[in-house]
Amino acid sequence: MTSVVTRVKKKQISEAMAQEKRMDGRDLNEYRELKIEQGIIERAEGSARVTLGRTEVVVGVKIEMGEPFPDTPNEGVLTVNAELTPIASPEFEAGPPDEMSIELARIVDRGIRESKAINTEKMVIEAGKKVFVVFVDIYVLNHDGNLIDASAFAAMSALLNTKMANYEVKDGEVQIKPGYEQLPIQNHPITITVAKIGDKLVVDPILEEEEVMDARISMAIDDDQNICAIQKGGNSYFKPEEILEAAKIAETKAKEMRKKLNW
Amino acid sequence: MNDKPEKLMDKKGLRLDGRKADELRPVKLEVGVISNADGSAYIEHGKNKILAAVYGPREVHPKHLALQDRTVLKCRYHMAPFSVQERKSPAPSRREIELSKVIRESLEPAVFMEFYPRTMIDVFIEVLQADGGTRCASITAAALALADSGVPMRDLVVACAAGKVEDTVVVDLMDTEDKLGAADVPVALMPNLNAVTLLQMDGKLTQEEFEKAVGMALDGCKQIYAMQKEALKSKYVNVGEQTKEEAEE
């Protein structure tokens, strides 16, 4: 990003924010319109498309059988990966995952994992030998800011839509039976990202705001309003009191979203 | 080392290694340990043993990464294959790539980046032995290495974690507490500016517990900051005295 343009933009955005206004007319703590469509990819065991304003993310869930990790023989495996496809932005390039997509995947992963959203103990076929492996693949299709929240919503929506094969074990062999079972979901983390621009905190930053923001903080809030994952990003800082304020904002917004989504 | 302890905290509220909830592990810091580097530091934080070295400001490589208005700070956090119980492949893992990013973002606010346009500053971190809280110890050492390199800085950066084991909020988790405990909250601080430059969390905490954990981590940071200053002084006071002796000869 050319720095002169960014500086001019930053001034514009900060000036508007001093009057509690944003470039797109939203309040500081207002989300863009969130739309969720589930089951859009029939080939996938679970899927969802999320649009958050102009940001668009598709998540597909595939389930395979595999080996559990040696330190968790009685649990299924969760793998989250993110692709910032070159379709989504002039800034994205094809190639191996860069640090931005690795960070995105790991933030979404932590929200799901630490809230124990999936009951992984119910995904064991044979303890220590065979378990279900859940692959959550995040596909960013249009980047207009706040990929973290959009991806987290999409991942959870896809998991809620995921079906596992029915099976039985006969003479040590796994046989697939007709019909499906719902993936066992027991928690519904909601990730809220708060961006700091100047001395203001705002939710759901658009790309223009992300380009000028000082830093961001993302918090995953579980069903019981616990915080279960946090990630600060961006090359500036938060004052300790701003962190606590962000935590309060995340708590309130998560509650609001949970009600809307009926999670 | 593989045995899982039954309890992470005994009846008296003492932890596995005998520490109280608000007690740090012993920390040892040394500045200027790699003679080839422009700045370097070594930290022992509990059983963590970590080296940080800074090269630069120097020519940007590859060139197209150069920025016209400031330097490019690059950071590589890397764990030695022998640093953990099971050999770790030397190829950078996704965890290491993420940590390199958040460590860089924790150091950047402290450096006057705009002083060195069209250059690059490399921060290399090698974890020789890991025992929980490596990202925090790495930041503490890397900030010292940056200061040692002479790059102008707004403040030092110091990091410490807090978390929850059994039902208690504790400071500075070691590996077993991190793995079996309920939550881990690493925090990095620029102590004079009272600015938090790294914050992560995994586990489960209520708002009240989170607030307490952040407070404890910040207290831990302030204690380690005092040691950071001592470490810098002990190198540069010595250098000062040597120069004086040489002048007298």
Image (spheres, grey):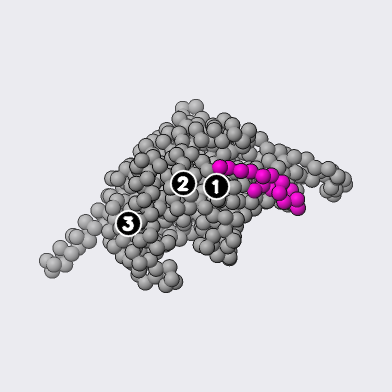
Query: Whole-percent x and y of residue A124?
Result: 74, 43
Q: Secondary structure at mark 1?
A: loop
Q: Secondary structure at mark 3?
A: loop
Chain of the residue on which disc 1 is drawn: A
At 55% from the left and 47% from the top, the residue drawn is A53
**Marking on residue A24:** 2
Q: Do tag 3 and tag 1 residues touch (Cβ < 8 Å)?
A: no
Chain of the residue on which disc 2 is drawn: A
Residue type, numbered disc 3: Val
- Residue at label 1? A53
Kindly report the distance in space between the C-alpha atoms of the residues bearing marks 3 and 1: 36 Å
Q: Secondary structure at mark 2?
A: loop
- Residue at label 3? B111
Residue sitting nearer the eye, A128 or B7: A128
At 51% from the left and 35% from the top, the residue drawn is A253
At 83% from the left and 43% from the top, the residue drawn is A179
Q: Is residue B127 left or right of residue A124?
A: left
How dense is the environment of label 2, judged by Cα within 10 Å: few (below 14), some, or many (20 and up)? few
Residue sitting nearer the eye, B114 or B8: B114
Q: Is residue A36 magenta?
A: yes
How dense is the environment of label 1, judged by Cα within 10 Å: few (below 14), some, or many (20 and up)? some
The stretch of residues the image draws in magenta is A33-49
Residue type, numbered disc 2: Asp
At 46% from the left and 27% from the top, the residue drawn is B12
Kindly report the distance in space between the C-alpha atoms of the residues bearing marks 3 and 2: 34 Å
Query: Whole-percent x and y of residue B44?
Result: 40, 51
Chain of the residue on which disc 3 is drawn: B
Kindly report the distance in space between the C-alpha atoms of the residues bearing marks 1 and 2: 10 Å
Count of number-bearing discs: 3
